[in-house]
Amino acid sequence: MTTDLNVIGQRARAAARKLARLTCEQKDAALHMIADTLLEQQEAILAANAADLEAARTAGTSKSLLDRMLLSPERLATIAADTRAVAALPDPVGETFDETVRPNDLRVSKRRTPLGVVGVIYEARPNVTVDIAALCLKTSNAVILRGGSDIRQSCAAITDVIGAALERVDLPADAVQSITDPNRELVGALLRLDTYVDMIIPRGGAGLHRFCLENATIPVITGGIGVCHMFADATADVERAIPLIHNAKVQRPSVCNALDTLLVQREIAPALLPKVAAALSPAGVELRADPEALAILSDARGDNDWKIVPAGEQDFGTEFMALILSIRIVDGLDDALDHIALYGDHSDAILTNDPEAVRRFVNEVDSSAVFVNASTRFNDGGQFGLGAEVAISTQKLHARGPMGLRELTTYKWVAEGDWLARS
Amino acid sequence: MTTDLNVIGQRARAAARKLARLTCEQKDAALHMIADTLLEQQEAILAANAADLEAARTAGTSKSLLDRMLLSPERLATIAADTRAVAALPDPVGETFDETVRPNDLRVSKRRTPLGVVGVIYEARPNVTVDIAALCLKTSNAVILRGGSDIRQSCAAITDVIGAALERVDLPADAVQSITDPNRELVGALLRLDTYVDMIIPRGGAGLHRFCLENATIPVITGGIGVCHMFADATADVERAIPLIHNAKVQRPSVCNALDTLLVQREIAPALLPKVAAALSPAGVELRADPEALAILSDARGDNDWKIVPAGEQDFGTEFMALILSIRIVDGLDDALDHIALYGDHSDAILTNDPEAVRRFVNEVDSSAVFVNASTRFNDGGQFGLGAEVAISTQKLHARGPMGLRELTTYKWVAEGDWLARS
């Protein structure tokens, strides 16, 4: 390998020590300088991006992927504005919490500190380079970025500009490094660079997450993937349920908090399902229904242009990322809870007017976010008030659900004594 | 493999769902029943333990290891009492925190929940079987235990007794399972059982931790290993420093928070080092000193029976687990911080009367616990007020330093709306 990851790791670690000593004001000034420099030096970035796009077009890359790769003056302006928005967020580093004085007068507290060095592996979105760099800088973490090989010229140019901005404010350019060498073995090597890297965040599909879990010796934050459920029980308000189901399925079907499976208690199915079909069909949603739901929908279809097909078992437990909804009739809450225990872990909602069902659903569903009479689409850092979102975690350690700035930190214990030895 | 880990995993997962629904009172009653049953059925446990010891003795196992393996009526009584002590601790599961109401009236909070299924791999201490089972039960986690092969009959007997106790209070015996099949490949397989297991805690030496990191696809809590430092700056109070250094090195040299390296600012070395040698030598401590420290100690030795040897670079960055202390003279705080940044991550202390040195040391040392004028031996769940300790983590994700009951939990987001769709 021509790229020496140990050198990159050592530089990142050295930069992290310097970042840990910065004040919030210094970090915010650096973020504004990055925004300024991105706009000032946009020609170099746009030229590199044009070269990436040209190569991708020649290679026959799909239109939707080309659009994801594309940078423009407008998009760069948005990226710069997002960077300034990160500067405006409160800095979690240095917060003291859980302070106590022990019986021997030892004063014990926890202090929030940077993680150190974060590794981020992502795909064809060059904006992620700036987005992650800003969030890591705000939390005094150095970052090693590995963008998809199809955007490597864009990533290199953006990283150069960020480095130049950091140096303008006397911060180490090594705080943000990109691995742009196309050698794919470097990804595996990065995952094992545990001497220098404290956390890996994969931003991509299930394959990337699995690859990271299989190969990393560094803790990996997995997430952004999951089957989302809504359960409408017999007491649900049919008229008010429809907009929620519509929103959760239709608003943005390609994202991780979009609805995949609707569970309907038997008693309410004849009233609810035809309205679901009537509301979702104009948006082009295909309904994959279990036999009972299929019978109800077929009876109600009449001349309507509803796409209804029988569901196979594989339609449950599938994250569709598309305008497809699987539907199952359940006996009641226990049946729904069993189904969700089997297939859920991301975002699951109950639609009900029964307080006891709310209590049990909230207690017993073991997912990153549980919703009561609200759309699963709210599982989002912005909606939950985090200000920024690094990832949505579906694992249980460290952070679960939307991860904001605080989730890019750890803590250390601080214990102050008056020349105390342990007795 | 005759042991089917998938079956064990499925049973653990099913038990975890039941545990998640228990009240604190039910869990505490189960813990008292485990204590009662351990005492009631101690003959079976002691017989199994005698068989393990007999086999180990035949295999030529060392005396100290045999003592670690040994159970006795007295030790079982202590184990039972410890189990009742866990029952007396507050239950973190179900706590609600970070509650906010969003501008759209979505009520968002976090609720503390069990992790689910915890895997614990440990060595020749049969008491760990009960200890971990109690802490996991208290936090509604199912647990899969893998004790060292030399105590497998003891583990099997203890697990049987715990299972019997759980069934007496109508809880699933599968909440606590032990893998007692001696096939070593099962450890590797457990580390990859990510469909069912949420967290792995290795309780053992550096080799076991490394093996887990290399092979696990499940998040691993690493820790319990590290080089601990004390830095005495020029303002340190020599008379008051000696008892702290003595305590940190001598009280229990075989544990992870025992002192390994003493860093001394040049100005105070002639006053401090001879007193360190005089205090530590009667306890049998060998001092491995850098050239400057060696010269001071040699000059001061006179007729004293001090063990002083030159330190090699390998004596820094070594966790001794023995009555050995490495000593280095440093120029001052920056030099000490550089040394600790290179070798430390566990427990590091400053001995000083300079408030600015305190501020910088606390801010800049990036270790699980930082001490000011106090012994590193305080890095302990009991001393920090956690009530119980599962492990001491030196990694940065999830938990750092002593881990108590709360660190055996995760959280889920709960969002309650009034039939809210995202706008």
Image (spheres, coloured by chain):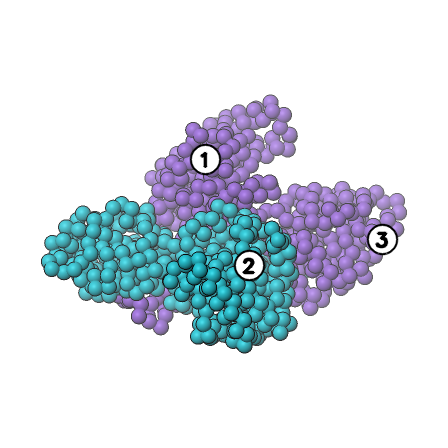
Chain colours: A cyan, B purple
Q: Secondary structure at mark 2?
A: loop
Q: Amino acid at mark 3?
A: Ile
Type of the residue with mark 1 = Ser
Residue A140 placement: quadrant: bottom right
* Towards the viewer: B260 or A315: A315
Q: Which residue is mark 1?
A: B178
- CA distance separating discs 3 and 1: 55 Å
Query: Which percent across, then down, holds residue B379?
Result: 60, 52
Q: Which chain is indicated by disc 3?
A: B
Pick the front one: B305 or A367:
A367
Task: Give the amino acid type for the residue marked by disc 2 in the picture.
Answer: Thr
| Residue tagged 2 | A180
Residue at figure coordinates x 43%, y 29% from the top left: B2
The quarter of the image holding the C terminus of chain B is bottom left
Q: Quadrant of residue A362?
A: bottom left
- Residue A195 in percent (x, y) is at 61, 51
Q: Is there a contact, CB below 8 Å, between mark 3 and mark 2? A: no
Same chain shared by disc 2 and disc 1? no
Mark 2 Cα-neighbour bin, 10 Å: few <14, some 14–19, many ≥20: many
Instruction: Name the residue at 41% across, 63% down.
Output: A66
- Residue A238 locus on image (x, y percent): 19, 62
Secondary structure under badge 3? helix
> Marks 3 and 2, Cα distance to the nearest angstrom?
52 Å
